[in-house]
Image: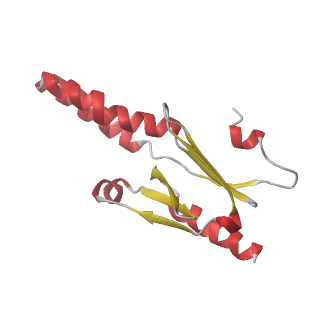
Amino acid sequence: MVTKMEENLTNGEKILVKAEQDKTILIVGGVITVLLLAVWPLAILWLLFIYRAWLVSYFTNNLCITNKRVYGSTGLIKKQELDIPIDKVNTISTSKGLFGTILKYETVTIKSFGDGWTFPQVKNAQEIKKIFYEQQENKS
């Protein structure tokens, strides 16, 4: 399956790294949902709000770095798209909470001109950060 980013590559542009979203959270969340539904009927609220948010995030968040730009998209209903030349991005930072530490994923935040985009549950966040800074150095 060809992604939107792959369709829009310019001459000489190549994708260097794509964000890999962590499937573990979906599996753990699914098991928790089944167990909760078995012992507590109101667990349907868990399913409708928390687990649904994880599913939407998993299937709608895309992030990649090419040799020329950073591209990302998020959202199901409210779609947001990020398409910024490498030299216009100020920073890429990563963070992780308790679940991220246990399940080994991080949140990637990209900042440019005061705007920020967040991509949660990324397994290869450090690789993305490293490749971004290498490309930014090459552009200087």
Query: Residue 43, percent across and down?
Result: 18, 27
**Which residue: 75% across, 60% down?**
68
* 91 with respect to 8 (left or right): left
**Colouring scheme applied when the structure was drawn:** secondary structure
**Which residue: 32% across, 34% down?**
51
Q: Quadrant of the N terminus?
A: top right
**Which residue: 30% across, 53% down?**
99
* 99 with respect to 41 (left or right): right
Vertical order, 48 against 10 (above or below): above
Vertical order, 74 against 33 (above or below): below
The residue most toward the front is 114
Q: Nearer the viewer, residue 51 or 82?
A: 82
The residue most toward the left is 39
Query: Residue 7, percent across and down?
Result: 77, 39
| Number of marks | 0
Q: Quadrant of the C terminus?
A: bottom right
* Image quadrant in which you'd find residue 47: top left
Q: Nearer the viewer, residue 56 or 18?
A: 56
* 135 with respect to 45 (left or right): right
* 73 with respect to 97 (left or right): right
Query: Residue 93, percent across and down?
Result: 49, 66
Q: Nearer the viewer, residue 140 or 20?
A: 140
**Which residue: 53% across, 60% down?**
110
Query: Residue 45, percent across and down?
Result: 22, 28
Vertical order, 64 against 138 (above or below): above
